[in-house]
Image (cartoon, rainbow, N blue to C red):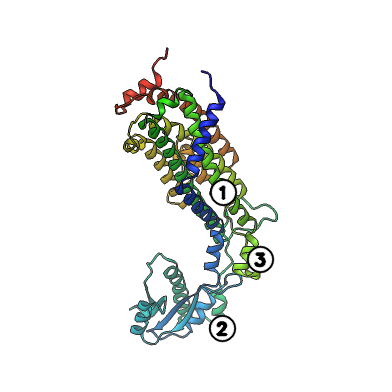
Amino acid sequence: MHIRLANVLTIARREYLVRARTRSFKVATVFLVVAAVLVTLAPLAVRRLDHGSTAKVGIHASATLSFDPIARLDTTINLPATPGGTGPFTFSTVSDLAAGRTAVDKGDLSAVVDIARDPAGDLAFTIISKDGPTLRIPTLLRQGSSVLATTDRLLRGGYPADQIDSLGIPPSVSVVGPTPPTPGEQPKDFAGELGGPLTAQALVIFLFMAIILYGQWVAMSVAEEKSGRVMEIVLNAASPFELLAGKVVGVGSLGLTQYVAAIIPAAIALMLQDRIAAFILGEAAASAAPAASGLTPSLLIAFAVLFVLGFLLYAVLYAAAGSLVSRMEDINSVVAPMTLVGMAGYFIAVYTSSGLIPGDAAWVVVLSYVPFVSPYLMLSRFATGLAGPLDLALASVLLVVAIVICLWVAARIYAAGVLTYGQKPSARSLFTAAFARRG
């Protein structure tokens, strides 16, 4: 089969210019640019919200206490404070429990802790809060309640009161990964650890939207020309394979244009992250806290590789699917199987990056190498540190092999489908178009 490169480039250029002039493309490009910058700076936003943020908590003592509960809570759960900021709570005494409930309901207080005694004489606590029991404020207050109960038991047992404060100071506790840090490497902070999953989810969403959107553009372009009988004229100047290649290259180039337009400001924000952190958090807090881990050069490269290969894999199949229909309204039904496969990979990747599905589960690891879902899963695992460059390389090689196979199948379906009118696609017609012997 003789392929004329000039025809491929002419078709690609036409696809690129027609789509680039549409209003939807311009709006989507602006949206991606803004979203990319926000994703880059998301960990800084988390640190800004955490920096110096305090919740107002009222303490109501229904029981008689031999110590100051506010002083004990300040010594424990309010220390150590965040770098350059304050502790998580500001405590005050509430003399009327009913008034405290009203303050929580109006939002003047985040919570009220009522301290009473149970029949055995131990302290019993009631936390009044609009937040659920598993959220941040009730969780920290439950920890503080344990400290108060222990303090009360020690004092009632005769433990020296002047030594209570030293017992309540929390120990130094670090949470680290299984791989020891290299010499000179700073530990990751909470915002940095949170930035990895957030960035992974955002990139997976971008990847899914790009593959589905650009793939449907390819299918719609084929169906549009076919329904208007333009295809018959075009085929006099170019072969079906040249049409297929031109449309995929044109729309793919348009996608890369959007990617570059979004990634340049994101890269600038990444390089200026320290200065932005100093402006938002202040010089002291920015220097005291480790840099947040958002987008990194290696992650951007991984996203680019998986975007290109994932798009090529789906685009050739979307083009073949578009050639099988004669009406634009039939597009959704013919591309539905590919969309469902992509959605399955997308949801698994999002749940993996959020921790709902273990990223190191055997079935997730295997699926991250399966071409039709690997762009999403490998990106998620790479962004969260569960996959390395070798894993990415192997997944990319398998994607290339799948693209070659799908290109051969799609080209045969495309060649048969572009001149077929008035027939609904079926599994049998697909098989015949793809594997029938050609004379």
Q: Is residue 189 visible?
A: yes
User: Callout 3: 10 Å neighbours few (<14), some, many (20+)?
Assistant: some
Tell me: 199 left or right of 298: left
Identify the image quadrant of residue 325. Answer: top left
Q: Nearer the viewer, residue 288 or 93?
A: 288
Q: Which mark is residue 360?
A: none
Which tag is nearer the camera, tag 3 or tag 1? Answer: 1
Q: Which residue is mark 2?
A: 162
Q: Which residue is mark 3?
A: 287
Residue that protrudes farthest toward the right in the picture: 184
Identify the image quadrant of residue 423. Answer: top left
Q: Is residue 361 above or below residue 101?
A: above
Across and down, in percent, residue 102 comes to 34, 81
Which tag is nearer the camera, tag 2 or tag 3? Answer: 3
Q: Is residue 61 above or below residue 354?
A: below
The residue positioned 57% from the left and 70% from the top of the image is 82
Alpha-carbon span between mark 3 and mark 1: 31 Å
Q: Secondary structure at mark 2?
A: helix
The residue positioned 52% from the left and 41% from the top of the image is 254
Alpha-carbon span between mark 2 and mark 3: 37 Å
Report the amino acid beneath label 2: Asp
Q: Which residue is mark 1?
A: 261
Q: Is residue 190 above or below residue 422?
A: below
Tell me: 370 left or right of 286: left
The mark nearer the N terminus, 2 or 3, is: 2
Q: How many marks?
A: 3
Q: Is residue 217 above or below residue 83?
A: above
Report the amino acid beneath label 3: Ser
